[in-house]
Amino acid sequence: MKEIVLCDDSEYLRVADLCEKFNVNVNIDAFNDPEYFNTYPNEIEKQLERYKNIKVCSIHGSFTDLCFGSKDSLIREATKNRFEYSYEISRKLGCKNIVLHHGYVPGTSYPP
């Protein structure tokens, strides 16, 4: 087994304690919501501080109402914008992996 990763389900204070106790890594979930920063503008700094001794190996990217395989070009463009938002957050957090729910299955969705 290479690593164990806990998804924090937006409860980073509780999950950070578990990560430290069991020496496991974390997947940050809170930033999948693009409106999160409007409600909690300082969250990246707070979470980075709490996770400073824990490896943030991935984040959950935006996924609500997104479909890269949509026939609608506006939906595809919105999806692209949200994925780019997720990429920027992952860069700020210093993690190399993003979990994306893309809604595209080759051969079953409209070609992008």
Image (cartoon, rainbow, N blue to C red):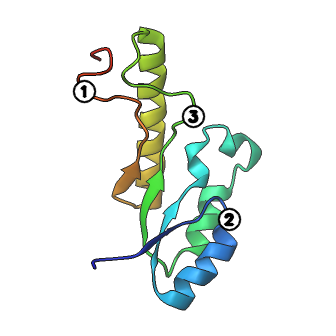
Residue 31 position, x and y percent, is: 57, 49
User: Which badge, 2 or 1, is on the more N-terminal residue?
Assistant: 2
Farthest residue to the left: give it.
107
What amino acid is at disc 2?
Answer: Glu
Residue 11 - label: 2
Report the Cα–Cα distance between label 2 and label 3. 19 Å
Residue 37 rendering spot, x and y as whole percentages: 67, 44
Residue at 40% x, 34% y: name it.
102
Q: Nearer the viewer, mark 2 or mark 1?
A: 1
* Circles 1 and 3 in contact, beta carbons < 8 Å: no
For mark 1, what is the residue? 106
Name the quadrant of the N terminus. Answer: bottom left
Which residue is pictured at 43% across the width and 39% down the height?
Answer: 101
Q: Residue at the far right: name it.
A: 39
Give the residue number, with chain letter if any, for mark 3. 64
Q: What distance separates the C-alpha of mark 1 from that of mark 3?
A: 20 Å
Chain-order first, disc 1 or disc 3: 3
Please give left or right for residue 2 compared with residue 66 in the image. Answer: left
